[in-house]
Image (cartoon, rainbow, N blue to C red):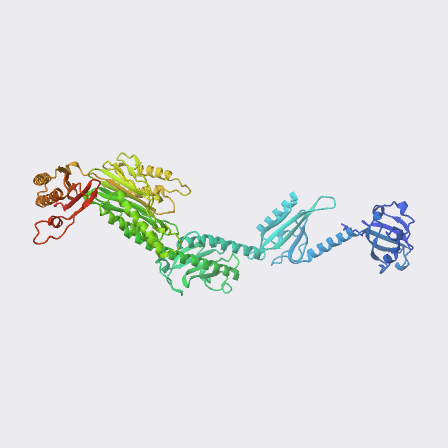
């Protein structure tokens, strides 16, 4: 097939004039008529110089002649061709070129010629350059023309004319590229920079990543002639990008939590297959005991994570330079001068060997992993200390008293801020009563735990005074305000305000009397307790929450409720009812009510019901501490209590002794008759003498024998040592010697003095 020449100065395309030796036009081509805007008749007989825009420039034009065949530039009339390039060829007609009598002048617009020559130079240089592989393929995807470095890799034949990609590339690679090129041939849509992998049949193990671009070629007849493909080797760029992407993903995985085990497991799952075929992480044993590892390698490493194939791949060279052992490498986990562990990775023979860039990447990942492991060690050390301290300050998970049987659940938070200041307590009070307490300190960590310890101690101290719940919270609020002031004076700069900080807290204080079956509750910013009736119905005590502790300025209002025997009181912290993404606590309280109704039904043991409620309400990771205290109430039967009211008359003392002796006889407690008669006599006598009447004497048979005398005076009795010459003043001293415990508490109408004696063992 004859090659076509698209040179604008080729005789097949250019405007042609045949002239004689004097430059007179003898004939012309149709293209000349079109260029010069003249007919052949008009052109015939004209001199070429007359076609110039300035005939006087003829000498300049002729001065460009440098041989028999020569080219030049001329400026024709604007309406007759303009700026043109021309080529002069002698028509020798058998003569020497110098004796020619006729000449062929071929001309074309200068811009057209320049554009063609630039394009021709571009194509020539494009096929000569070595940066981009270039291939022209026909409609059957056979190679027609390529530049030298089409694929400068082992296994590419020197002569590619007429070859297919499948003749020298791996079958799967050739098939993928052919599919892309065939799509371009079919649709005409160009393909721009699509990554493809290339492996030759001779050397399939070492592949390259090429960015493939392609566009469809059209013939002179407008039909599809083939496709041109360009291959740019982007292996190093893509590998660098992959390494950077792997580093970013590894950093994200390392930042997910503060557990050395979980973090390293996430890491090895990224390293395989992102970097290697097998990866393992060993961590120093000291990390798990929260101690500081040494600065040098030791044998005390624990394998905490592994992924991929057999760890035997690591035996060939883990820990050495990749040049010496290209299929295995390792990096130490070092941070803050401590050696915390080691990462090892390995590749099988089907993958390319490790490079120095891979080792640099592993070193960077190891340095970041080391910081995370050390942060996890430090965090867990503090968290363990805080949890141990907090658990040591909390009561036993279960308690059993005359008034209630309790079971509790405490779960510390999973967040990186550390445990918070949740606490609960079950405090025995006088006269068989009990106090139930739940509180929540603001903040997390050791500061919150320390504040919790101070508050719990304060609550126990105040509870020992037998204060009403509202009065106890008032004293506790004053104490927290003093904490804030003391902390502010220690750390505050002059003129700055004192911060609420980690000293604020909420608290719910509930007392229960098994004799009257009445519950008295007050709240300092804490959610109300739930009450599960024996029939399974659930409600919440109508407690009006006062301000949190430390705010001050508002009173705390007590609420009294009668509780049926066998009911369950549920005290909790907000971590149990808060929902992620929901600020409405009513939803959480409704869910708690449903969970309590189902878990506590049919007298189920509280030790089983508590964990079941928590599992239902907090199925996932904890964003805050969770505390739940369940208390099943008990009642002292009416037959185990006796009460009498006496006027303030000394003659009533004898009657009081008789009543006591008679009641003890009915109870079969004659062993305690003498002591109890004496105690009752002293208490009634003191009440008549110093408080006036009326007064009430009450006996309670519970875990111990309780004797109480209540009067209308608010003056607390004081035990003192009487002098030898004094006739009185020894009553309370005798009571203290004869009973196991005694004390006095304020009431709304005065005070009550009580004593306790151990019951004799059953016969």
Percent position of residue 680, x then y: 11, 43
Tell me if 244 is positioned left or right of 27 in this view: left
Percent position of residue 116, x then y: 75, 52
Tell me if 745 is positioned left or right of 77 in this view: left
Tell me if 481 is positioned left or right of 75 in this view: left
| Depth order, front residue of 5/712 | 712
Look at the image and tell me in which quarter the C terminus lies: top left
Depicted 127 relative to depicted 624: above or below: below
| Depth order, front residue of 348/54 | 54
Whether residue 609 is visible here, answered yes or no, is no
The count of marks equals 0
The residue shown at (39%, 42%) is 579
Dividing the picture into quadrants, the one containing residue 661 is: top left
Whether residue 552 is visible here, answered yes or no, is yes
Percent position of residue 748, x then y: 22, 40
Percent position of residue 484, x then y: 34, 52
| Depth order, front residue of 76/105 | 76
Tell me if 455 is positioned left or right of 132 in this view: left
């Amino acid at each position: 097939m004859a090659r076509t020449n698209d040179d604008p100065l080729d005789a097949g395309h250019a405007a042609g004039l045949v002239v004689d030796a004097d430059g007179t036009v003898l004939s012309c081509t149709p293209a000349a008529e079109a260029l010069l805007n003249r007919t052949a008749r008009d052109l015939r007989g004209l001199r070429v110089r007359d076609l110039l825009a300035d005939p006087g420039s003829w000498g300049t034009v002729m001065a460009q002649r440098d041989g028999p065949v020569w080219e030049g530039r001329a400026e024709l009339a604007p309406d007759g061709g303009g700026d043109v390039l021309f080529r002069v060829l002698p028509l020798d007609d058998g003569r020497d070129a110098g004796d020619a009598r006729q000449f062929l002048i071929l001309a074309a617009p200068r811009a057209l010629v320049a554009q063609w020559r630039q394009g021709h130079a571009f194509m020539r240089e494009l096929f000569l350059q070595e940066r981009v592989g270039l291939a022209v393929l026909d409609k059957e995807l056979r190679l027609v023309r390529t530049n030298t470095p089409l694929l400068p890799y082992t296994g590419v034949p020197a002569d590619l004319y007429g070859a297919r990609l499948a003749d020298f590339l791996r079958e799967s690679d050739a098939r993928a590229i052919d599919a892309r090129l065939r799509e371009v041939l079919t649709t005409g849509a160009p393909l721009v920079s699509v990554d493809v992998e290339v492996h030759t049949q001779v050397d399939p193990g070492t592949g390259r990543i090429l960015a493939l671009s392609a566009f469809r070629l059209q013939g002179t007849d407008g039909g599809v002639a083939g496709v041109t493909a360009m291959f740019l080797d982007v292996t190093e760029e893509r590998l660098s990008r992959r390494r950077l992407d792997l580093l970013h993903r590894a950093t994200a995985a390392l930042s997910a939590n503060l557990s050395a085990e979980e973090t390293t497991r996430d890491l090895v799952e990224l390293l395989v297959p992102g970097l290697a075929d097998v990866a393992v992480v060993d961590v120093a044993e000291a990390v798990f005991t929260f101690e500081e590892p040494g600065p040098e390698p030791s044998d005390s490493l624990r394998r905490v994570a592994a992924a991929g194939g057999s760890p035997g791949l690591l035996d060939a060279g883990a820990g050495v330079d990749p040049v010496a052992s290209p299929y295995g490498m390792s990096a130490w986990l070092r941070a803050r001068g401590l050696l915390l562990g080691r990462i090892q990775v390995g590749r099988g023979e089907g993958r390319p060997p490790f490079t120095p860039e891979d080792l640099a990447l592993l070193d960077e990942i190891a340095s970041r992993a080391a910081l995370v492991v050390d942060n996890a060690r430090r965090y867990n050390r503090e968290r363990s200390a805080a949890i141990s301290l907090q658990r040591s300050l909390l009561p036993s998970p279960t308690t059993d008293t005359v008034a209630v049987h309790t079971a509790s659940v405490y779960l510390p938070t999973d967040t990186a801020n550390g445990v918070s200041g949740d606490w609960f307590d079950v405090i025995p009070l006088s006269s068989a009563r009990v106090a139930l307490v739940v509180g929540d300190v603001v903040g997390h960590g050791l500061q919150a735990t320390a504040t919790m310890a101070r508050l719990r101690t304060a609550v126990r101290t105040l509870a020992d005074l037998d204060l009403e719940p509202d009065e106890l919270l008032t004293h506790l609020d004053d104490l927290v305000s003093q904490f804030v002031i003391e902390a502010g004076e220690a750390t505050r700069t002059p003129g700055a305000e004192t911060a609420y900080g980690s000293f604020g807290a909420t608290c719910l204080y509930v007392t229960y009397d098994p004799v009257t079956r009445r519950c008295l509750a007050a709240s300092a910013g804490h959610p109300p307790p739930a009450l599960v009736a024996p029939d399974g119905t659930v409600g919440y005590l109508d407690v009006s929450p006062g301000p949190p502790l430390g705010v001050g300025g508002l009173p705390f209002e007590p609420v009294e409720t009668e509780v049926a025997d066998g009911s369950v009181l549920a005290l909790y912290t907000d971590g149990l009812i808060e929902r992620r993404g929901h600020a409405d606590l009513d939803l959480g309280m409704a869910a708690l009510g449903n969970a309590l109704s189902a878990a506590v039904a049919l007298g189920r043991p509280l030790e089983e019901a508590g964990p079941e409620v928590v599992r239902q309400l907090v199925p996932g990771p904890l964003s805050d501490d969770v505390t739940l205290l369940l208390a099943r109430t008990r009642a002292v039967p009416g037959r185990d209590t006796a009460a009498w009211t006496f006027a303030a008359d000394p003659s009533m003392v004898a009657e009081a002794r008789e009543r006591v002796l008679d009641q003890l006889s009915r109870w079969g407690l004659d062993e305690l008759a003498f002591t109890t008669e004496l105690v009752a006599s002293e208490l009634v006598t003191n009440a008549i003498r110093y408080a006036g009447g009326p007064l009430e004497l009450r006996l309670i048979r519970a875990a111990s024998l309780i004797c109480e005398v209540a009067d209308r005076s608010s003056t607390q009795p004081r035990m003192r040592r009487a002098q030898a010459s004094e006739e009185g003043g020894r009553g309370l001293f005798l009571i203290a010697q004869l009973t196991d415990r005694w004390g006095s508490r304020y009431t709304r109408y005065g005070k009550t003095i009580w004593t306790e004696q151990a019951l004799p063992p059953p016969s």
